[in-house]
Amino acid sequence: MPRFSVIVPVYKVQAYLHECLESVLEQSFPDLELIAVDDCSPDACGAIIDEFAARDARVLAVHLPENVGLGRARNAGLERATGDYLIFLDSDDTLTPHALRAIADRLKGTGEPDVLVYDYARTYWSGEVVRNQVSAQLSEEGPAPFRLDERPGLLRLLMVVWNKAYRREFVERAGLTFPPGYYEDTPWTYPALMSAGTIATLDRVCVHYRQRRHGSILGTSSRRHLDVFEQYDRVFAHVDAHPELDRWRPVLFRRMVDHFGTVFAKRGRLPRAARAEFLRKAREHYRRYRVPGAPADPRTRLRHALVGLGTHRTYRLLSFLSRVRKRAVRPAAGLLRAVRGAALQFHYRVQLRLPLRADRAVFSSYWGRGHGCNPGALESAFRSFAPHIRTAWVADLEHHHTVPAATGRLRPGTAAYWTALARSKYLVNNVNFDRRLVKRPGQIMIQTQHGTPLKRMGLDLQDRPAAARGTDFAELLRGADKWDYCLSANRHSTLVWERAFPSSYTTLEYGLPRNDVFQRATSADVDRLRESLGVPAGAIAVLYAPTFRDYRRTQRHVLDPERVLRRLGPRYVLLTRAHHTYGAPLTDTAGGRIVDVSGHPSVESLCLASDVLVTDYSSLMFDYAVLDRPIVVLADDREAYEAARGTYFDLRAFPPGAVAHSEDELIDIFASGHWRGSRSTRLRAAFRERFCPYDDGRAAERVVRRVVLGETAALPPFVPLAERRPVPPAAAALPRVPGSAPPVKAPAPAPLGSIPAQGAGVPLAETL
C-alpha cells in the first residue's frame, strides 16, 4: 500500500503532460502510485501515459473508452487508488520539488488528519509566479489537527480539490465522489471540509497552478456554466442529509451567491443568450437557500441584492454605470496626480531659493527602505560625533518603525521630503536620490555604496545587456556628478568606483560603516541574536545568502535545504537569506532547522548570529570576512553568471574559503570539515588582507570627522588586521575538527564605551 495515490485526469494537454507526470515521479518522497486517467483524449496524451507506465512501475495507465469529463475521470482514478492518502493534480499543473515529502512530514506531525490543506502559486506563461493571496489562512500556528469550526477562514481559499490531501478511508466513509459537469470541485470540497473530523494546514507552496495564455476551460464561452446551479444543489443536499452541518448554511449561502456573481461578471463565460437565464436561475437559488439575517458587509449585501432581484436589465445597467464610473475616475485620478506633482515641484523650487540649513542631514538607503546599511551606520555616527546636526531618514511608511526615535521620519514624495532635499546641507544614500534633485552649492552628498563590488557595476555593464536591461547610462552619470564623496572599503573598490562611475567626487577609503558593529558587538550580543532567531544552543548556524541572477527571468533557490540538512545531521541550522526578487520563501519541513530570514531588517545581525556563510557571488562575503569566520562559495553556474553579469576577478583563483561547484561538493566540504580547515583559514586570511584593510570598527567615525567636522590630520589611525578582535562566533559551535587549525581564543572584547566606533553612545540593538 503506497503512502500517496496521485490521481491525474488527462485530456488534451499533450504539451504539458510530460512536465506534470515528471513532477510527481521525480519527488524526493518515492512512496506513491501515479494513476493517470486518459479521458479519451484525441491527441497524444494516451501514448505519453503509456510511455511513462512502461518506464516506471509506479504509474498506472487508465484509458476510458469515451470522454466522460473531469469529474468522472477522477472517479475512475478513485476506484483504482490504494494509497493511504489521495492527491489530485490537474494534468497541466505540477507539484513543486519535495512537495510530497513536506506533505508526508506534516501528516505525520499532525496525527494523520482526514484532510491536509496546502498552498499553491499561479505560474504564468511569462515566467511570473504569484503565490495564493490568502495564504495567511494556512498558518501552522496554533493546535493541529482541528475542525473547520476552529478555522472557518479556510473557506476563503479557492474551493478546488487539488490543494488538499485526503485520507482515503475518510473519503470512502464520507461517500465522496465527483459529479458530472462544470464546477465539479464544488460539491466535493465543501462536504469534505465540513465533514472532516480532523484538518491540518501546510504553509508551503506544493502546487504550481498553470495559467494558460488562453485560459482554462472555465474561461470559455458555454451554456455549461449553468452547471454551477446543480453543483450547489448537491452541496445543500449534502447538508440536508447531515443535519449536524446546518450551522454552515449561512456561509455556504454567501459563498454561493458570490460564486454566481463571479461567473456572471467574468467576460466571455456566458453566451449573450444565456445571461438572462443565468440571472433567473441565480434568483431562484437565492430565494431557495437564503438564510435571513446572515451577516455581510455593505458591498456584499448590495451584490447579493442584485442577484436576489435577478433582473437582467438592472444588472446590465448597473454594470454599465460602473464601467462609466471607472473610465471617468481614471483620467480624473491621473489629472489629480499630475496637479499634485506639479504643486510639489513648485514647492521644491521655492525651497531651493531659501537658505541652506547647515545643521540638517537627510539619509536614505535602498530606495526608501528602513534604517540600515552604511547610511544607517553613518546616521548613528552623526548623532554621536556631530550631535549639533539634526538627522532625518527617508523611508516608506511601512519601514518607519525601524527608524530610531531620535531621528526624524520623512515619506518619499511629500512636501516635507522635498523641503529636506532642498535645504539640508548633508545628503547621504547608498543609491541615488530622486533624479529631479537639484544639487545646490554648499550641499554635500555622500554616496556610501552598499558593498565591495565583485560583479560588474556602472559603465562596466554597457556590454552586458542582460544585466543592464535598458539602464540609462547618461542618467547614471548625471547622478554620480552630484556626489561629493564616495565611500570605499579597499583599494579594489576605489579603482572600480572611479572607473564605473567616473566623476569628480572624492573617494574616502575608510572601510564600510555598516561593518563597524562587528568590532563592537560582544559574545552576549551574539547569544541574544541567536536566541531571537531560534538557533538552538550548540548548533552550527549556516547563513545561506545567494545573490540575484541577471540571466534568469525568475529567481529560484539553488540549494535543496532539506537534503543538505539530512546529509549534515541534526546539529546544523540553515538561515536562508533570499534576494528580494526570489519567489516563495523556503518552508521549514526539517523540524525547525530551516529559518527564513529574508525579511530580517539587518543583515549584519544575521552575520553575527551565524557561524559560517554560504554564498555565491554576493558582496556579503567581503563584509563577512571582516568577522574572520568561515566562508564557503557555491559557484555552480559560474560560466552563465560570468557571461551575463561578469565579475572583476576570478573568485576561484582568489576565494575567501572553500569553493563548491555543486550541492554534493558543498555537503562534502561540510562533512569533511574543510569549511573551517587550515586551508580555508589561509585563504580567508589572504582575502581579508586584500579586501578588509580598513574595517577596524571606526569607519563611520572617520567619515563624520572628515566630512562634517573638517578634521583631516587627526583621524583615528587604522588598527592592523593582526590586532583586531571581531566578536567570535558562538563558542559551543566551534569544536576542534580533525585536520583543521586549532581555534584561536580571542581576548574578551573591550567594553563598548571604550571603542568610539559606529554609533558610540547608541544602544547596540539600534545599530543592528
Image (tube, rainbow, N blue to C red):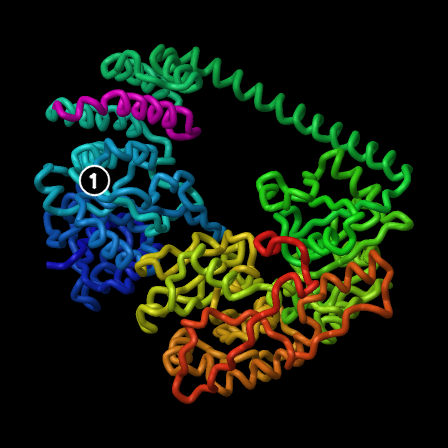
What SS does tag 1 mark? helix
The x and y percentages for residue 370 are 61, 48
- Quarter assignment of residue 701: bottom right
Q: Is residue 503 visible?
A: yes
Given residues 487 and 609, the one toward you in this image is 609
**Residue that appears at 42% across and 30% down:** 268
Given residues 565 and 117, the one toward you in this image is 565
**Residue that appears at 44% across and 45% down:** 213
Does the segment drawn in magenta span residue 265?
yes
Q: Give the overall secondary structure of the magenta segment.
A: helix
The x and y percentages for residue 317 are 48, 13
Name the residue that disc number 1 marks.
Answer: 71
Q: Amino acid at mark 1?
A: Gly
Given residues 528 and 124, the one toward you in this image is 528
Q: Which residues are magenta?
A: 243-270
Q: Is residue 430 visible?
A: no
Given residues 563 and 477, the one toward you in this image is 563
The image quadrant where one finds the C terminus is bottom right
On the rendered structure, is 547 left or right of 186? right
Does the segment drawn in magenta span residue 186?
no
- Above or below: residue 121 compared with residue 29: above
Q: Residues within 10 Å of mark 1 (few under 14, many from 20)?
A: some
- Quarter assignment of residue 181: top left
- Above or below: residue 337 compared with residue 385: above
Direction left: furthest residue: 173
